[in-house]
Amino acid sequence: LQTPLNHAPGELDSNAREIELTVADQGVTRVTGLILTRATEQILRVTDLPALPAQTGVTSSVVVQVVADTAVRAVFANLPSTVRVDEPLVDSGQPLSVSLYDAYDNLADGQVELSLTGGDAAAVLQGPVVQQLVDGTAQFVGLSVSVAGDGYQLVANGSLLSVPFSVRGLLPTRLLFSLQPPAQVSPGERFSVMVTVTDSGGGAFESYAGTVQLVLLNGVLLHGVSTASFSNGVATFTD
């Protein structure tokens, strides 16, 4: 019995079958259509069934190492349905996991390369996008999407898609004086200040459409126009 040491799943099967040899076969036969579907080390055994009960059969076996076939399915774990632009898809304590399976549900080996589809065509998947499969699973941290949009999907190895997810814009988080008031002014002297609303990434939240009011904490009356609207994330006070 001769067989290669490595087979992809689907080339042999583990179902026993009985084959009758005739004199014309001269003791040799070819068995086709066998399938093995589980990627692991398996033993292929052939047994000569004696013609008479008193005779002893002969058994021979060979080890067949079955390796996983090309991945046809990906399972994405810990991928949220909504994330913020430029912020990590997942936190470092709970990585994004991608498991690859072949047609017989064997875990694949090799590596996973992620890309992005859907949403805004200008979006970029940022961070380390290639990871090695370990026991069929690759783990990713530090990934983010550069542009807000809906209907994004991660793509593993060029064709295996995740479920869709959305990327929202950053949230306004704080106000800061981008133009500080002077350290000292005379009574009645006019001065200007600028207030910027920033997002969680530290940049100006340019789409913010609110207003801001200035007051003095010591109870002194602040003269002039003390309320201003934001434009491109900045409110300007000139009087």
Image: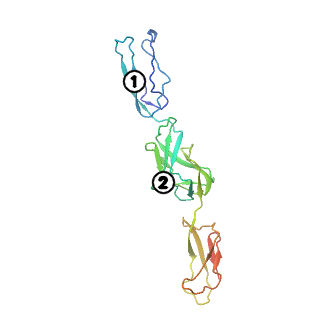
Q: Relative to residue 216, is residue 106 drawn left or right?
A: left
Q: CA distance from mark 2 to mark 1?
A: 46 Å
Observer able to see residue 138: yes
Outermost residue toward the front in this view: 53
Closer to the camera in the image, 185 or 91: 91
Q: Relative to residue 97, is residue 215 drawn left or right?
A: right
Whether pointer 2 and pointer 1 mark residues with C-beta atoms closer than 8 Å, the reply is no
Residue 23, relative to residue 3: is it above or below? above
x, y percent for residue 239: 65, 83
Observer able to see residue 132: no
Name the image quarter holding residue 52. top left
Comes first in the chain, label 2 or label 1: 1
According to the image, label 2 marks what residue? 141
Q: Secondary structure at mark 1?
A: strand
Q: Secondary structure at mark 2?
A: loop
Residue 111, relative to residue 2: is it above or below? below
Residue 216, relative to residue 52: is it above or below? below
- Packing grade of label 1 (10 A; few <14, some 14-19, many >=20) is few
Which residue type carries mark 2? Val
Which residue type carries mark 1? Arg
According to the image, label 1 marks what residue? 45
Q: Relative to residue 137, is residue 171 drawn left or right?
A: right
Q: Relative to residue 59, is residue 223 drawn left or right?
A: right
x, y percent for residue 230: 64, 72
